[in-house]
Amino acid sequence: MNKFPMQNRYCRRNATMETTKEITALFTLIDDPDEDVFGAVSNKIVDYGKNIIPNLEHLWETIPNEATQNRIEQLIHRLHFNDLTEDFKQWSRSGHCDLLLGSLLVSKFQFPELATTTTLSEIEKVRRNIWLELNNYLTPLEQVNIITSILYSYYGLKGNEVNYQEPNEFLINKTFESKKGNQISNGIIYLILCEMLDVPVKVLRIPKQFILGYFKPGLSPENLHNPFHKIEFFIDPTSGQIFTHQDVDDYFKRISVPPVPSYFKPLQNRQVIQYLLEEFAKCFKSEKETYKQYELNQLAKLIDE
């Protein structure tokens, strides 16, 4: 039995009071005009971790000065970004690098308080509808036609060309919410469903495109010198349209690029999320938002490491 319970309680309360005093003192310096002072104060506040965010949000609501509010917003963003960086480190270290989890982490960059249950529920609903229609006797084309029909016709997913003026179209939570994405977000949803259903569809490295390929069973395409001939057909995830080998050959002629074997090696999940981060970063080119572009590219490099 602890002989000094009152003393321990007093020590804890005293430590809490000291912490509160320090936080209050730091908050009074947030509006200091000296950038060096603000930098030191910022670092000290960020050291407290994300648990200090409610305090910062309360401070933001009680301060009428817009410049100080902007500083508080920067601090909150830094705290969320530090937390997200740790999540990406953990995701990257995992063996499988779950594609659904990785894409939701990208969404959390823009929506740090994102509740993922709605997106998880929506994708499970689509997966189940497709699973009920699939069987072992279907041809590859029939399998893909079922996925495409349910995802685009029954569920109503629409696709646009990649537009860096529409950052929400890169994020799967927003794509599910509006039922409208671009080639990349639609493609990632298509990949997630195929992965869940054991359908051998992968994304390819074809220039300026996020095109999917249905791979024949057998040797792993990653280990082949030229996996082009392992692909049954190609899928444009913008709408689910099927392309033949001839269509792809014509595309390479049109862009005057030789169709070298490396373009037909499928991307791994880690590379898919890295690509998503890099493309999403291109949405933030204004002077006010270039820090977001820098941070997203840092996350992409982190995954590469």
Image (spheres, rainbow, N blue to C red):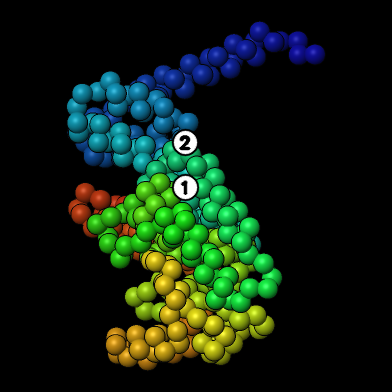
Residue at coordinates 71% horizontally, 10% vertically from top-left? 4
Residue at coordinates 20% horizontally, 23% vertically from top-left? 64
Compared to 121, does 213 lie above or below? Answer: below
Q: Secondary structure at mark 2?
A: loop
Q: Which mark is residue 49?
A: 2
Q: Amino acid at mark 1?
A: Leu
Q: Is residue 7 left or right of residue 141?
A: right
Q: Amino acid at mark 2?
A: Gly
Compared to 69, does 134 lie above or below? Answer: below
Q: Callout 1: 10 Å neighbours few (<14), some, many (20+)?
A: some
In terms of image quadrants, where is residue 299?
Answer: bottom left
- Residue lying furthest right in this view? 1
Of residues 34 and 288, the one drawn nearer to the viewer in this rendering:
288
Q: Indicate the position of residue 175 as horizontal and vertical percent values.
A: 40, 52
In terms of image quadrants, where is residue 76?
Answer: top left
Residue at coordinates 36% horizontally, 28% vertically from top-left? 56
Q: Secondary structure at mark 1?
A: helix
Q: Indicate the position of residue 48 as horizontal and vertical percent values.
A: 46, 33
> Which numbered disc, 1 or 2, marks the residue that appears first in the sequence?
2
Q: Is residue 93 left or right of residue 157?
A: right
Which circle, 1 or 2, is nearer the viewer? 1
The answer to whether residue 195 shows anywhere in this view is yes
Q: Which residue is mark 1?
A: 84
Q: In whole angstroms, how far apart are the C-alphas of marks 1 and 2? A: 12 Å
- In which quadrant is the N terminus drawn? top right
Q: Callout 2: 10 Å neighbours few (<14), some, many (20+)?
A: some
Does the CB distance between marks 1 and 2 fall below 8 Å?
A: no
The answer to whether residue 270 shows anywhere in this view is no
Residue at coordinates 51% horizontally, 87% vertically from top-left? 228
Q: Indicate the position of residue 52 as horizontal and vertical percent values.
A: 44, 30
